[in-house]
């Protein structure tokens, strides 16, 4: 028996949407920020969303702990454990730097992890009022409408729009992509969770990130997978693992493009 009824996806969706509208939108362009020890940005909005969702999820499922980006490392380790326990995985504000500097590209990302795998995923972009959802084996949706990553397939890598975070790639790979890219065009938006679901929505066809955290990608990974997209790490193993160590991600909207993209990346690593 699952620890949380998966039929309650619609209830969770409304909870996340309401939180985004009431905690993020009123603070956008009206809040200060500070820097954490690792140099990343934090705002009052991050903390307000975390507090509100933590309490709401505790009321809904008191037996399931919450893992959040804004917790201490010690708290995070105790919750994830060996990766087989059930826990909520929350990024209360993915794209905090965008939010802090007035760039309208950020979201709330929430996933339920059971037995080491995401089974429920919700990503809400309050600026566009877009809510991406997925349930394991139930498909993915955008505002309630079925979502397919390959509805408008691209057959050749050279025609693709790539979503790439250059900052966390090796210098050699980043230079090769900058000087001699195999794709047509490239974008980098500043929110890992939205990168995954924009790929699922066909707004890009291939994806690359060198080092993302569990709360960054857990929900997006499930949504892309349920939308028919393909992903792995740069080493070719599953891009999802319920661990705190950062992982790379290579993804595409369909199998053919993934194979072309992964092979190109592999060839660069051998040169």
Image (cartoon, rainbow, N blue to C red):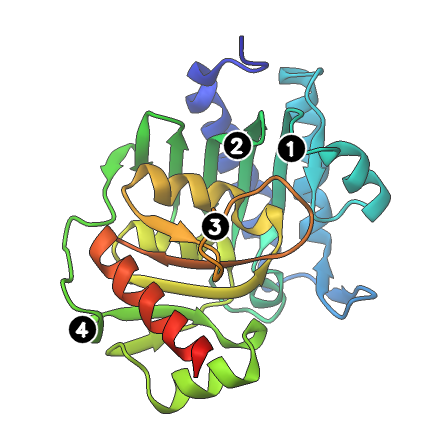
Element on which disc 2 rests: strand
Sequence order check: which comes first, mark 1 or mark 3? 1
Q: Position of residue 56 (x, y in %)?
A: 65, 25
Residue lying at 40% horizontally and 70% vertically, measured from the top left: 266
Image position of 80 with respect to 42: above or below = above
Mark 1 vs mark 3: in front: 3
The answer for how far apart the CA atoms under marks 1 and 3 are is: 32 Å
The earlier-in-sequence mark between 2 and 4 is 2
Label 3 secondary element: loop
Question: What residue did someone put label 1 on?
Answer: 53
Where is residue 189, by image quadrant?
Answer: bottom left
Between the C-alphas of marks 2 and 4, the distance is: 33 Å
- Mark 1 and mark 2 in contact (Cβ < 8 Å)? no
Q: CA distance from mark 4 to mark 1?
A: 41 Å
- Say which residue appears at 36% left-offset and 41% top-offset: 225
In space, the residues marked 2 and 3 are separated at their CA atoms by 15 Å
Position of 204 compared to 125: left or right? left
Q: Which residue is mark 2?
A: 117
Q: Earlier in the sequence, mark 2 or mark 1?
A: 1
Residue at screen point 52% across, 44% down: 240
- Mark 4 vs mark 3, foreground winner is 3
- Residue 212 badge: none
Would you name the residue on which mark 4 appears? 159
Residue 143 visible in the picture: no
């Amino acid at each position: 028996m699952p620890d949380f009824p998966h039929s309650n996806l619609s209830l969770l969706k409304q909870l996340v949407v309401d939180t985004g509208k009431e905690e993020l939108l009123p603070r956008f362009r009206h809040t200060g920020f500070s820097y954490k020890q690792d140099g990343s940005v934090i705002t009052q909005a991050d903390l307000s969303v975390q507090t509100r969702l933590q309490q709401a999820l505790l009321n809904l499922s008191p037996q399931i702990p919450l893992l959040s980006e804004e917790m201490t490392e010690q708290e995070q380790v105790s919750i994830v454990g060996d990766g087989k326990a059930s826990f909520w995985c929350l990024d209360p504000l993915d794209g905090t730097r965008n939010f802090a500097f007035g760039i309208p590209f950020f979201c709330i990302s929430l996933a339920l992890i059971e037995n080491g795998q995401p089974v429920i995923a919700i990503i809400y972009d309050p600026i566009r009022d877009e809510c991406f959802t997925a349930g394991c084996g139930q498909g993915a949706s955008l505002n309630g409408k079925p979502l397919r990553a390959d509805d408008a397939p691209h057959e050749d890598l050279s025609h693709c729009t790539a979503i790439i975070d250059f900052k966390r790639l090796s210098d050699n790979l980043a230079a090769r992509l900058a000087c001699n890219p195999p794709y047509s065009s490239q974008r980098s938006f500043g929110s890992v969770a939205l990168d995954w679901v924009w790929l699922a929505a066909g707004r890009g066809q291939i994806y690359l990130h060198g080092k993302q955290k569990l709360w960054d990608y857990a929900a997006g990974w499930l949504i892309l997978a349920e939308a028919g997209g393909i992903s792995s790490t740069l080493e070719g193993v599953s891009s999802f693992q319920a661990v705190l160590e950062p992982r790379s991600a290579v993804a595409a909207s369909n199998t053919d493009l993934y194979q072309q993209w992964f092979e190109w990346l592999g060839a660069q690593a051998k040169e």
